[in-house]
Image: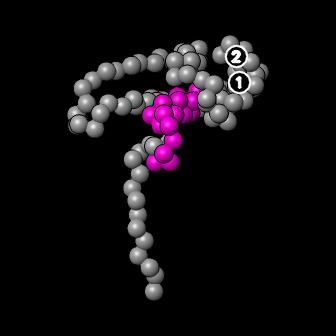
Amino acid sequence: MSEAMDIEHGTGNVFADLGLPDSNDRQTKTRLALAVNDLVANRKLRQIDTARLLGIPQPKVSALVNYRLDGFSVERLMSFLTRLDQDVEIVIRPRRDDQGGQVTVHSLR
């Protein structure tokens, strides 16, 4: 016989589920970095070419590719997207429930 397992549903933010500080900021940065890394991969850019395009040293590109994002702000990641010929839109709207506001990143392809 198998034992019953308790399943705990996540919040949708793995960083919050892990109890990490600044979980919303971490999730936003990760989603922006994912968009940057997808664009770089689709263009088949080498790290040195990516560094030149983004205006950062190659070791910073390595950090970005490996999602070591402590050295990057949300604003800086958004600027990388614009350097990769992407539009970044910020939409502010009222929250539909009383859970408090949040930042969400959507990538349209």
Quadrant position of residue 49: top right
Classify mark 2: helix, strand or loop: loop
Q: Is residue 6 within the magenta segment?
A: no
Q: What is the tally of numbered marks visible in this picture?
A: 2
Quadrant into which the N terminus falls: bottom left
**Vertical relation: 19 (above or below) 64:** below
Q: Is residue 47 left or right of residue 18?
A: right
Residue that carries the numbered disc 1 in the rendered image = 60
The picture places residue 75, in percent across and down from the top left corner, at: 52, 18
Q: Which residues are magenta?
A: 17-37
Residue 85 makes an appearance in the image:
no
Q: CA distance from mark 1 to mark 2?
A: 6 Å
The label number, if any, that marks residue 56 in the structure image = 2
**Vertical relation: 48 (above or below) 63:** above
Task: Tell me which amino acid carries mark 2.
Answer: Ile
Determine the residue positioned at 46% across, 18% down: 88
Task: Tell me which amino acid carries mark 1.
Answer: Lys
Determine the residue positioned at 65% across, 16% down: 54
